[in-house]
Image (cartoon, rainbow, N blue to C red):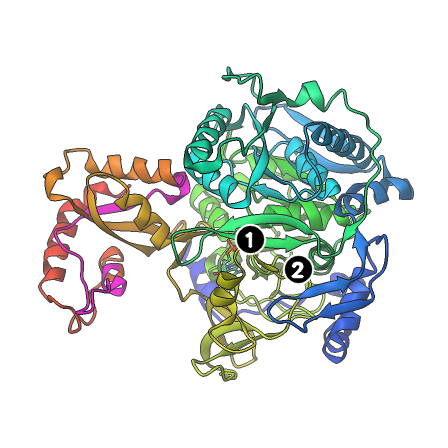
Amino acid sequence: MSETLSNLAREERRFEPPADLAANANVKEEAYDRAASDNEAFWAEAAERLDWGQKWDQVLDWSNPPFAKWFVGATINAAVNCVDRHVEAGRGDKVALHWVGEPADDARDITYADLKGEVCRAANALTDLGVRKGDRVAIYMPMIPEVVVAMLACARLGAPHTVVFGGFSADALASRVIDCGAKVIITADGGYRRGAPSALKPAVDEAVSKVAADGGEGLVEKVLVVRRTGQDVSWNDSRDVWWHDVVDSASAEHEAEMHDSEHPLYVMYTSGTTGKPKGILHTTGGYLTGTSYTHWAVFDLKAETDVFWCTADVGWVTGHSYMVYGPLANGATQVMYEGTPDSPHKGRWWEIIAKYGVTIFYTAPTAIRTFMKWGDNFPADHDLSSIRLLGSVGESINPEAYIWYRENIGAGKAPIVDTWWQTETGQMMISPLPGVTAGKPGSAMKALPGISVDVVNDEAESVGNGNGGYLVIRQPWPAMLRTLWGDDQRFIDTYWSRWEGLYFAGDGAKLDDDGDIWLLGRVDDVMNVSGHRLSTTEIESALVSHPKVAEAAVVGAADEMTGQAVCAFVILRDTAGDGGADIVEELRKHVQKEIGAIAKPRQIMIVPELPKTRSGKIMRRLLKDVAEHREVGDVTTLADSTVMDMIKTKEGSSAASEE
Ligand code: PRX
């Protein structure tokens, strides 16, 4: 990075909203006061932007915290809001998705009328396959239009979906299918990534066998398979069904039932502090209200003219809230891209922006840092003048990346909305409003209207400006998670038991002298790798499930590209000897098989001991010092203070295992 850029970023910078955007903004400053004076009236007004079957008797029922009910007594259908109503309003010819496949020239424009037809067909086909309201459907697909169709078809039927990221392993898919009891899996033969077809169906076959072996015999009744790449797949005639055989021939007419506002919409699994992923449950009315309102407010969406592109994979919550439900409920035109940013060349994203005239672009800091590394010439080679607003999500955007993004993608003038939220919050919670709030590089600024966040100390007291502490949320919000699938107690324990009546987000934060919020990262054992959450314990469990491993400790170490990187310290079993020459690679592959490629440790150190306190607790803080190549901190509480010397000696000799 150039020196001037670093200097620029280090200065206290502040970018005021552009005058034209401020003058025409969807949401003005008064929204904060209006929401503060009557929160429920504010969200009721946001809910009026949707089409309801029956309206609510009560906006919020918070009589049994932490179990919230929003829009009590109302009925709604998410799919009708995302497709039918736009067609009925005469906008059927409007493009919903400019879908771009990874292979060159592989693209499809899908209008809202097309989408309606496909969703209805898929809903009919799923019904024929035995899917009924309340049944769970797992979706394990590449970024192709059928994944959006599949999600909306499930929503239409009231069959909660659980989308499992296509990069997750068969084991991860199996455990999610078992946890939520999915009776159908929708998948594809494969998808295109990094210039080649990659397979999905074999992982589904393996997952279904694993589900059966783990006590779920007969659970998965059908596997619905989209043909995307044409690669060979093994086939089970009694279970597997081709999408084109049953969906293409189904009727494009489907009468949608209105579901209760609190009917489950989906379950999304995310890593927690313990080994087992948590099934975050989102319901219908409040979720759609929260996501559609924030998409409209934070991106200042003008549905008639904007072209929106959120680069997240649909396997993460960002893809759910800001590629599927929020934007489609708002009738937006979007870009959806199947592949990686460097296929077939490093300017692919900028080429897509230029081709479709993308006006609002939403991506993650890790991607921005990658582009910075690749060089300014790639965006400079394309016409990005259509861009008027930029967004960031997944981790704090470091000031250097913020400035680079603004200068190189936003022509030095597009505002950046740094949006803080979580799988659990469902919707954005902290972000500038582009026509109202100034942007400071590195700060997500303040809570959106209708959202009440605070930074508190151990005693739950507000820390006040100029101080740091824990980020909490004081009041329920429409898209909040309702519980963890099948585990109310864990829901209470994880989020609501640290302090009475406060939602604990798991993040540290600081308020600056203006009261603006700076996120400081997780305060628990959750890592953030490329904007994705990974649990240290989950990876430790994966490592110790390998027959050569006796003990493992995992830490997230600072990484210039990915924010944090997985670093593991492993003690081998005596019977494993030195583990063999390829032990590090063998263990990395094992983690990939157990969880998925994103969890693969960047570095594995084989060590003779782990630093433990006298009570046997691993002192991760010291391991983090080693992983981040720092002077090791205070070792006085270690049971054996010589352990760190042994580990440091090992570190010198294991640098080769780092990629
Ligand atoms: O630590 C925060 C970080 O990502 C966590 C939520 O991860 P996940 O549920 O996977 O959702 C990611 C996409 C919404 C948070 O607890 N995080 C997310 N956005 C930001 C962030 N940290 C700082 N700034 C952000 N804008």
Q: Hey, what amino acid is under mark 2?
A: Ala
Q: Quadrant of residue 615?
A: bottom left
Q: Which x, y percent locates residue 371?
A: 48, 44
**How far apart, in angstroms, are the residues tagged by discs 1 and 2?**
16 Å
Q: Which x, y percent locates residue 255?
A: 84, 37
Q: Which x, y percent locates residue 346?
A: 50, 35
User: Depth check: 411 or 198 in front?
Assistant: 198
- Label 2 CB sits under 8 Å from any ligand 1 atom: no
Residue 501's place in the image compared with 639, above or below, is below
Residue under circle 2? 479
User: Depth check: 143 or 549 in front?
Assistant: 549
Residue located at (77% from left, 63% from top): 72
Q: Main secondary structure of the magenta part?
A: loop
The residue stretch that appears in magenta: 595-623
Q: Quadrant of residue 311?
A: top right
**SS state under label 1:** loop
Residue under circle 1? 485
Residue located at (15% from left, 44% from top): 573
Proximity of marks 1 and 2: CB atoms separated by less than 8 Å: no
Which of discs 1 and 2 lies nearer the camera? The answer is 1
